[in-house]
Amino acid sequence: MLSYQHAYHAGNFADVHKHLVLYAVVDHLLRKASPITFLDTHAGRGVYPLDAPETQRLGEYRHGVLPLWQERGRLADEPLLASWLEAIARVQPDSSRLERYPGSPWWLGQRLRKDDRLQLFELHPGEHEHLTLQRLPVNVRRSHADGLTGLLAGLPAATPRLCVLIDPSYERKAEYGEVAETLLAAMRKVRHAVVLVWYPLLPAARHRELLEHLRDGGLRKIWRSELTLHEPGEERGMYGSGMLVVNPPWGVDERLAAAMARVVPLLGATSRYTADWWVEE
Ligand code: SAM
């Protein structure tokens, strides 16, 4: 079953959360010279025109990236947010107007250096066909293949460092367990890998299975970051966005806390941001 299309949700509050965490992690990793392989197991389309019919249908970006974009003048004193919004401006045909929103392949690849690599997996034939990155260098490979299998098959990476984003659509309940199993197997092969896993916060709370499976599997150094719009159960559907970072770079938590303190008030009066160690060192 592959019915999910990220274009319906591009630029929503969960994308803001996910891509800010991703941006901060990548920024920290690029402070060192040694080459990195970036790997995106569930790539989506790469760049999303906000005027596409799918994106306009739900218009979720109007309650996600748009309020931040509109306030970018006032947010210019917050270093992480200012630089994240400048990056978004670089994707626009006219940097004064928000017309496109970049997806994870772009966020992972936008500062790729000559010896870094980017490997993208996208299983949906239509989404893979759409996958565009714009102005990215040649050390990018994309595969029309299952991302979790592809991740394990590609390890260990050819570079000294590895950074992986696992961002499934969780259309099948089994995906929570599959992600956990794959992550445990990947970490056995590359213990120093920095891995980010996105998960939805839904009233059924299936993300607990993912979190508990990782903890019970013995994985250490798992940092958790969650952005919620309201308490669970008040409305149907996704009420929050979660990110795990295994082996987070030092200092990322503080930078994100400062940025999120400015994001949260723009997302509504009941929004909250929390972050802690799910499993410590
Ligand atoms: N990571 C993207 C971003 O942040 O811009 C969004 C990805 S979206 C949540 C999930 C994507 O995974 C969809 O495009 C879907 O077609 C794709 N997908 C679903 N199952 C997959 C699989 N087993 N392997 C690779 N891609 C898959």
Image (cartoon, rainbow, N blue to C red):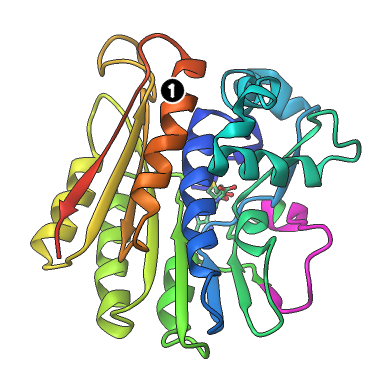
SS assignment at label 1: helix
Image quadrant in which you'd find residue 49? top right
Indicate left or right for 244 with 165 as reference: left
Residue most extreme to the right: 94
Identity of the residue drawn at 69% across and 58% down: 128
Image position, residue 229 (x, y; %) = 38, 19
Of 179 and 106, nearer the camera is: 106
Residue 136 magenta:
yes
Of 267 and 234, nearer the camera is: 267
Image position, residue 205 (x, y; %) = 22, 33
Question: Can residue 3 be seen in the rendering of this structure?
Answer: no
Q: Which quadrant of the rendered structure holds the C terminus? A: bottom left
Identity of the residue drawn at 26% across and 19% down: 232
Question: Can residue 136 be seen in the rendering of this structure?
Answer: yes
Answer few, some or many: residues within 10 Å of disc 1's Cα (few below 14, many 20 plus, some between 14 and 19).
some
Residue most extreme to the front: 77
Image quadrant in which you'd find residue 53? top right
The amino acid type, in three-letter code, at marker 1 is Val
Q: Is residue 212 above or below residue 27?
A: above
Image quadrant in which you'd find residue 138? bottom right
Q: Is residue 79 above or below residue 107?
A: above
Q: Which residue is mark 1?
A: 264
Q: Is mark 1 within 8 Å of ligand 1?
A: no
Span of residues in magenta: 127-141
Residue 243 magenta:
no
Identity of the residue drawn at 60% across and 28% down: 75
